[in-house]
């Protein structure tokens, strides 16, 4: 089988930040790398889940919602994937810089009730906010 693009990157050389790759169908996968891979510092499962709910909600309700295909966590717990159409790197960077503060002020975790979520007990808003703030600082330097 062919090795998928994300497995072709040398993760030991991959830094925290924002990375992108466009496939043949015009979908761009943005790698929102919160943590340096293989460095022993990972997002907790509860924070990862909460960030997914917060950011997916904000992005899918924002000004670029028609161009958002998917937002979800990486299994390695070092970040998230954002799949888009018709959005440049610069546009997504600006969108994230705008969306993270919006996610940080949400009082409730969207979709976190039992009937809305398959694992409603696994959330941590405090840790999610800490991770989002840290990633926002990384984006400010890009």
Image (tube, rainbow, N blue to C red):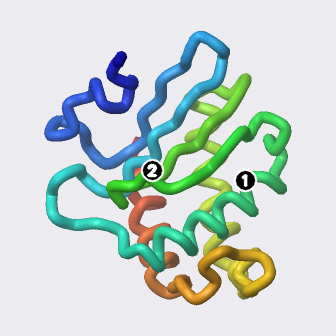
Left or right: where 99 falls relative to 29:
right
Could you tell which of marks 2 and 1 lies nearer the N-terminus? 1
**Which residue is painted at 82% across and 44% down in the image?**
65
Q: Is residue 111 above or below residue 52?
A: below
x, y percent for residue 105: 68, 79
Observer-nearest residue: 117 or 6?
117
| Quadrant hosting residue 27 | top right
Above or below — where is 54 with respect to 120?
Answer: above
Cα distance between the residues tagged 2 and 1: 16 Å
Label 2 sits on residue: 139
Residue 42 position in % (x across, y down): 29, 66
Instruction: Please tell me whether residue 101 is drawn above or below residue 12 in the rendered image.
Output: below
- Where does residue 83 sit, x and y in percent of width and height? 62, 37
Please tell me which residue is depicted at 22% across the width and 66% down the height of the picture. Answer: 41
Does residue 110 show up? no
Mark 1: few/some/many CA within 10 Å (<14, 14-19, 20+):
many
Q: Nearer the viewer, residue 82 or 6?
A: 6
Residue name at image x 70 percent, y 75 percent: 117
């Amino acid at each position: 089988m062919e090795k998928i693009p994300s497995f072709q990157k040398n993760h030991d050389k991959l830094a925290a930040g924002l990375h992108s790759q466009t496939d043949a169908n015009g979908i761009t996968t943005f790698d929102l790398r919160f943590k340096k891979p293989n460095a022993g510092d990972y997002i907790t499962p509860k924070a990862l889940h909460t960030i997914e709910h917060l950011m997916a909600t904000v992005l899918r309700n924002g000004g670029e919602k028609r161009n958002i295909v998917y937002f979800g966590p990486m299994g390695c717990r070092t970040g998230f994937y954002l799949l888009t159409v018709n959005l440049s790197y610069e546009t997504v960077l600006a969108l994230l810089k705008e969306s993270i503060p919006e996610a940080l002020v949400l009082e409730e975790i969207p979709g976190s009730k039992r009937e809305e979520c398959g694992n409603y007990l696994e959330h941590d808003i405090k840790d999610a906010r800490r991770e989002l703030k840290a990633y926002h600082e990384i984006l400010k330097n890009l």
